[in-house]
Image: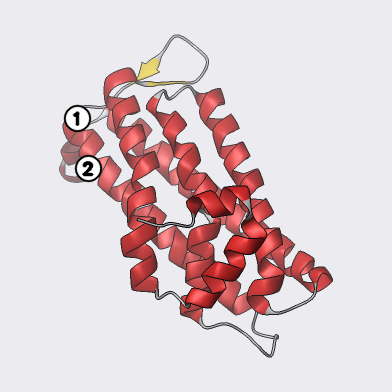
Amino acid sequence: MSNHIWGLIHHPDKEWRSINEEHETVSHLYTHHVLWYALIPVVCSYIGTTRVGWTFGGEEVFQVSPTSGLILGVAFYGLILLAVAAVGSVIHWMARRYPERPSRAECIVFAGYTATPLFLSGVFAVYPVFWLCVAAVCAGVVYTAFLLYTGTPSFLGINDKEGFILSTSTLCMGVLILEVLLIVAVALWSMGSEHSIMWYFFG
């Protein structure tokens, strides 16, 4: 698994330089980082929705069966993996006017490490109270933004002002992708609490 987690939390500037020097491939990123850390929100959501149940501030609890939870968890996991690649592709597209534009693969690696706080915040889904999960996601977004702002200038070889502008645009696009992901995830888990997945698709 990745050895950059502590560095990104404790001294992100130094850690970004170390990540840039490694020239990591996308396959290495996924097998040593994304595939593992993306399991945190998926496994915790599975436990929370099958054992505890979602609550939205009232007395009603939305709970899914273990079978439905497994199917939904696989779908959620796939969405997360696609989201990392999508954000990396967005970064690559937005950096098109810079002479030292990184490759798409390097941008996906950058996006994968930037998303680390969001992966870690998924641990709160094990007790799926809506306000608690929203607070955890917001905290994850804040630290993700911090990593983005500190890492973009050195990653693209640009000054801090240009890095700030690009980071802000990237953050807006990333938050939009995150919102879509969350909406789809909540819809999937809520759907599973009311219907059998097989009945929904084939009934």
Colour scheme of this structure image? secondary structure
Q: Position of residue 89 (x, y in %)?
A: 51, 73
To which residue does mark 2 refer?
A: 71
Position of the C terminus by quadrant: top left
Q: Name the kind of residue labelled 2 in the image.
A: Ile
Residue at horizontal 63 percent and vertical 56 percent from the top: 12
Tell me the SS state at disc 2: helix
Residue lying farthest top? 59
Residue lying farthest bottom? 99
- Please state the total of marks drawn on the protein image: 2
Q: Name the kind of residue labelled 1 in the image.
A: Pro
To which residue does mark 1 refer?
A: 66
Residue at horizontal 43 percent and vertical 25 percent from the top: 128
In this rendering, would 98 be left or right of 37? Answer: right
Q: Is residue 115 above or below residue 90?
A: above
Residue 35 is marked as none
Mark 1 / mark 2, whichever is N-terminal: 1
In this rendering, would 22 be left or right of 163? Answer: left
Judging depth in this view, the residue of 183 and 133 nearest the camera is: 133
Q: Position of residue 153 (x, y in %)?
A: 71, 71
Q: Position of residue 78 (x, y in %)?
A: 32, 55
Location of residue 93 by image quarter: bottom right
Residue at horizontal 63 percent and vertical 53 percent from the top: 11
Q: Is residue 101 above or below residue 90?
A: below
Find the distance from the CA under tag 1 to the CA under tag 2: 9 Å
Judging depth in this view, the residue of 172 and 9 nearest the camera is: 9
Q: Position of residue 114 (x, y in %)?
A: 55, 58
